[in-house]
Amino acid sequence: MAKTKAETIVYPVHNGLYVNLTNRCSCACTFCIRQTADGVGQDGEGGENNLWLDHEPSFEEIMAAFDEQDMSRYEEVVFCGYGEPTCAFDMLKRVAAEVKRRYSLPVRVNTNGQGSLICGRDIAPEFEGIVDTVSISLNTPNADEYAAIVRSRFGDKAFPGMLDFAREVRKYVPNVVMTTVETTISHEDEAACQRICDELGVRYRIRAWVNS
Ligand code: SF4
């Protein structure tokens, strides 16, 4: 049976409630579930257990989806989903502020770090007070490999733009993390990622191959 609208907008993962704002993304990562036969295609067609939104939900639809949840069981609200949440940045800010006001829960944004490129301005200051953690997919320490993996519409500007965003957003958000996925790069490259994160003043995390 197809998922209901509310279950497509918010969905539990471990102790977090994840929020799916948009299908849009500046990237077409080679590993993205959007690219695979088991997931959903960029054309929006997919299996019955997908998170593809038939339209971007309104603020009222999103908060109605929250209303259906027992929020006492969650320790965190995470903006993630099948698209890049900063592609719907105005909505992200509005919902994050409301989540903080209503539930006093920590808010995390999982992002490709290209939000300032997407929005055409430095969006880092706008995270202040409404987002507690920003988790940025670093993927690799190598700019050319990054470009080949994420296939961003910003091309060669994507890697330095992502690093600039990390450098800026750490001024406004208590926890900034950059991640790679275990086994996808060499230990040498992981050490290089650690050096990049040290220079930026953010935490480096090697995460398991799951949506976390
Ligand atoms: S940034 Fe995330 S949503 Fe966008 S294509 Fe890559 S993995 Fe998929």
Image (cartoon, rainbow, N blue to C red):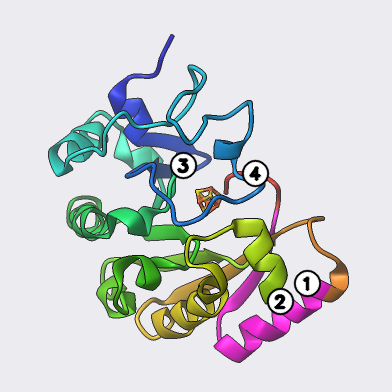
The residues bearing labels 1 and 2 have C-alpha atoms spaced at a distance of: 5 Å
CB atoms of marks 3 and 2 within 8 Å: no
Tell me the element at label 4. loop
The residue at which mark 3 appears reads as 82
List the single residue furthest toward the left: 60
CB atoms of marks 2 and 4 within 8 Å: no
The residues bearing labels 2 and 4 have C-alpha atoms spaced at a distance of: 20 Å
Tell me the element at label 1. helix
Residue 210, numbered circle: 4
Label 3 or label 1, whichever comes before in sequence order: 3
The residue at which mark 2 appears reads as 193
Residue closest to the eye, 50 or 24: 24
| Mark 2 Cβ inside 8 Å of ligand 1 | no
Amino acid type shown at disc 2: Cys
Tell me the element at label 2. helix
Residue 203: give x, y in percent of width and height. Answer: 60, 76
Residue 190, numbered circle: 1
Query: Which stretch appears magenta?
Result: 189-207
The residues bearing labels 1 and 4 have C-alpha atoms spaced at a distance of: 18 Å
Amino acid type shown at disc 4: Val
**Horizontal side of residue 120 vs 174, given as left or right:** left
Dot 4, crowdedness within 10 Å: few (<14), some or many (≥20)? Answer: few
Amino acid type shown at disc 3: Tyr
